[in-house]
Amino acid sequence: MDNGLQMKMYSFTMDCKNPHALAKFYAALLEWDILFFDEEYACVAPPGTQQGAYPGITFQCNPQFVSPVWPDAPGTQQQMAHLDIAVNDLEKAVGQAIRCGAAVADAQFSDNWRVMFDPVGHPFCLCLIKHIFAAAK
């Protein structure tokens, strides 16, 4: 049924206290560009992306932001979502993430991905998915 409605994912938004600082981390990690930033919001997207023509990651200022705890623990701030980032070389990706300011989570549950924390504590996963990159060649 075509009712004229169109939808396109615009962004995945993450709360933090300093949007520009967190945008700089993800821009460095993913080798993306910071499309805009101010005190309230920042956005990163793949190089060459025009504003409004992405999905990207946006960062929203929340002065009451509390870092989630992972794995979950009773009585603590729970994660509500996390990013999965496909990589073709897990160990190199972990090294890159650490150089950008990430930390490796103490708890790991697979040899095929690494749970990491961004500089403000959001968990994200580096996932070894080589076939994605082979198809892009």
Image: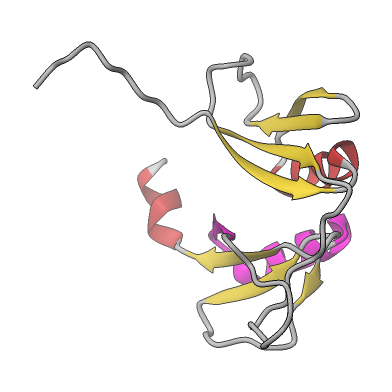
Q: Is residue 80 magenta?
A: no
Where residue 92 sits in the image (x, y, percent)?
A: 70, 65
**Which residue shows up at 78% across the image and 60% down it?**
118
Where does the C terminus fall, quadrant-wise? Answer: top left
**Which residue shows up at 72% across the image and 84% down it?**
75
33 sits left or right of 5 in the view: right
The relative height of residue 84 versus residue 113 in the rendered view (above or below) is: above
Quarter-wise, where is residue 18 in the image? top right
Where residue 84 sits in the image (x, y, percent)?
A: 54, 59
The relative height of residue 83 versus residue 72 in the rendered view (above or below) is: above
Q: Nearer the viewer, residue 117 or 47?
A: 117
**Which residue shows up at 88% across the image and 60% down it?**
101
**Which residue shows up at 61% across the image and 69% down it?**
90
Q: Is residue 90 magenta?
A: yes
Point out the stretch of residues depicted in magenta. Answer: 82-101
Where residue 126 sits in the image (x, y, percent)?
A: 60, 65
Quarter-wise, where is residue 50 in the image? top right
Where residue 26 sits in the image (x, y, percent)?
A: 75, 46
Q: Nearer the viewer, residue 8 or 87?
A: 8
Judged from this view, the residue extending furthest toward the top is 4
Where does the N terminus fall, quadrant-wise? Answer: top left
